[in-house]
Amino acid sequence: MRQPFARSTVSLLLALAASPFLFGGCKKAPAAPQQGPLPVNTIAAIEKEVIEWDEYTGRIEPVESVEIRPRVSGYITAIHFTAGPNVLVTKGDLLFTIDPRPYKAEFDRTEAEVKRADAALQLADIDFKRAQELLTKKTISSSEYDQKVAALNQAKASVAGAVAARDAAKLNLDFTEIHSPIDGRISDERVTVGNLVQPGAGAESVLTTVVSVDPLYVYVDADENRILKYIKMDSEGTRSTARKEKRDAYMELANETGFPHEGHVDFIDNRLDPNTGTLRARAVFKNWNPLVTPGLFARLRIAGGPVGKAVLIPDRVVSSEQGVKFVFAVKPDNTVERRNLVTGSVLEGQRVVREGLKAGEQVISTRLQLLRPGMSVKPVPEAPPAPAAEKSEAAK
């Protein structure tokens, strides 16, 4: 008789335990508190006088580069330098020696020919002078006199030919010693002692190479739009082109910043490359380190316009979408407005703004991914960055 009672008691207790959830489900959930304006940091656009720079990429090339080749054929008998990581040579240093004996023998033979021709010329001159005396005494005919004159001229020509042959033989003998034609860094030897070398234009005739180390060239290619910009500024009188006056240039290597090396543009090609639409230009720099090697990547910077006032904002606040650069500006009512910009180059982390923003306007610098035009924000001005150390006058 107690079992049914126990079952009913358990059922009643379960029902009572579930009742708060059943009745609680009918109540309305409390409304979420309304979210206030989004706190964001802002930065004011500033206006200051700047030089807008154009930057290019290029390669360092030597001012002088020589492939050392033999001018006469023969066997290498000596190499007078040892290849190393930084072997510098001076103009006139002896590099290779080709076996000189055949050329010395030829020179001796031509030298003997010159002496023989000189002796023949002396004899012809004696005969000519005797013929002149006999002709005045009318003891020889004019025909015999003419023969003596012709013999003298022939002897003179023989001497000239012998001297020319001797000079050619002397040149060949001199060419058996190969000297460096420039100061610079030498490469390794491409042949060893005992090898036969011959003159020629092919790669197999190169014995070694020498490149100069000071000064250095940097070659870059300027695109057509920049060239047209320079031409327009020249015609407006705001900036003359490098064809008219010396233009300063600044260079940095791949591991450098701030373009610390100063030089100038010294060459501009005479036509654009129709395949690439670019114009080749060259700047020259004094080498600050003899270990700097031609072929290194370099960045080149030149003034892209005159000194003038420009609106600047930190480059980190500029966003881009499908090639259009923009910022989020704060309107007077603290709502967000998207501003499309026409920008220029970056100067020490500051982006030049040509159109789309005025000095003093506030741009948002944080939470950019959360922003939408028209939304309310709570602007908090950022502390201005510490002023950077003044750069040298050349880098301004």
Image (cartoon, helix red, strand yellow):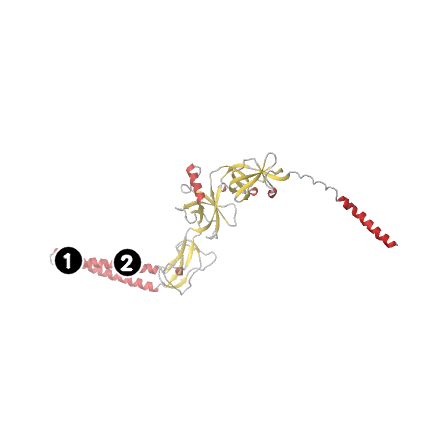
Q: Identify the residue at image location x=25%, y=62%.
A: 116
Name the residue at the top extreme.
Answer: 332
Does residue 382 show up? Answer: no
Q: CA distance from mark 1 to mark 2?
A: 29 Å
- As shown in the figure, which amino acid type bears the numbered disc 1? Tyr
Q: Name the spot of residue 296 as percent of width and height, x first.
A: 48, 52
Q: Which residue is mark 2?
A: 164
Q: Which residue is mark 1?
A: 145
Q: Name the spot of residue 332 as percent of width and height, x first.
A: 59, 34
- Contact? badges 1 and 2 (CB < 8 Å): no
Mark 2 closeness class: few <14, some 14–19, many ≥20 residues within 10 Å: some
- As shown in the figure, which amino acid type bears the numbered disc 2? Ala
Q: Nearer the viewer, residue 76 or 133?
A: 76
Mark 1 closeness class: few <14, some 14–19, many ≥20 residues within 10 Å: some
Residue 41: image quadrant is top right
Q: Nearer the viewer, residue 113 or 391?
A: 391
